[in-house]
Amino acid sequence: MLRIMICVLVLIAATAVADSQANEGRATGGPDAFGYTYFDQVDGCSYSWIDRAGALPYVDGTNQSAVIPLGGSGFDVYGTPIDHLTASTNGYLSTSLSDTGDDSTNDCPLPVVPSSGGGARIYAVHDSLSTTVYHQYFSVCPRSHDIAGSAAMGCNVFWWDGVSVGGFSRSQAILYDRVYEIVVQIQIEESHGATSTTGLQNDGATDGLTYVCDTDGSVNTGVAVCFAHPDPVPVELLRFWVE
């Protein structure tokens, strides 16, 4: 029995290393100090918009926020397990459940201490926005994740639908169970990135990873950015214990 357990753990470790190396080969940004990397639609992060039919609206307007419980097995941001996120109508998610969502001045480049609020943050399109924020959990995500060698799994999806200073703004953040990948997709952004930030930063703003910020023409229809967590839970290990 012990020999079987050791063989399984060795196989899991080898698979995890191989998966990590496969994803590092596609990284076009990072790593930050924690180890996050990213690649976009040019380098294989597929743009596959998830329709929000059936998603619940949680909050709308200007400088508003809502605390949203996550479905599935929870998530991990910068090494901290979470089961709720605060969604701001200004285009970001925060791990701080007291964040009021009124941070309308985008931070560039990351990391930057926010002008208001806090927590670790996922910036889909952080700008001065007026949007409705939707959320839905899928037990099998409609968009496949990008972690090599791992099985299909669930995801939490957040949508922002409204207007920015330049016109219409529609984006989404996809958070995958267990592999902890974060994918930001932008369907339309009529400010074109001139006054927005897309990226991640940790609680305390001592570490972060900027995909793009304050760059006119950088954010357009069909943008997809995959942020890879450096330490996803090996799916093979979870399968072993379940079986």
Image (cartoon, rainbow, N blue to C red):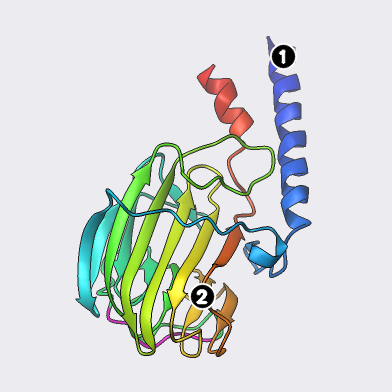
**Position in image of residue 185 (x %, y %):** 50, 64
Q: Amino acid at mark 1?
A: Ile
Image: 224 above or below 141? below
- Image quadrant assignment for residue 97: bottom left
What residue sits 74% from the left and 59% below the top? 26
Instruction: Choose between 192 and 34: the one closer to the eye.
Output: 192
In the rendered structure, which amino acid carries the disc numbered 2? Thr
The percent position of residue 233, horizontal first and vertical second, equals 58, 40
Q: Is residue 212 left or right of residue 104?
A: right
Main SS, magenta region, reads loop
- Mark 2 element type: strand
Q: Residue 79, image x and y in percent?
A: 53, 55
**The stretch drawn in magenta includes residue 104:** yes
Question: What mark, if any, has residue 97 been given in the picture?
Answer: none
**CA–CA distance in space, label 1 to label 2:** 45 Å
Part of the protein shown in magenta = 102-108
Q: What is the crowding at mark 2: few (fewer than 14 residues within 10 Å), some, or many (at least 20)?
A: many
**Residue 8 located left or right of residue 201:** right
Residue at point 38% right, 54% down? 51
**Does the rendering let one see residue 109?**
yes
Which image quadrant: the N terminus?
A: top right
Q: Quadrant of the C terminus?
A: top right
Label 1: which residue? 4
Please give the name of the residue rendered at 72% of the width and 48% of the height, measured from the top-left corner: 20
Q: Is 162 a magenta residue?
A: no
Which of pointers 1 and 2 indicates the residue nearer the eye? 2
| Label of residue 198 in the image | 2
**How crowded is the residue under tag 1: few (<14 C-alpha within 10 Å), some, or many (20+)?**
few
The tag earlier along the polypeptide, 1 or 2, is: 1
At a point 44% along the width and 61% down the height, the residue shown is 173
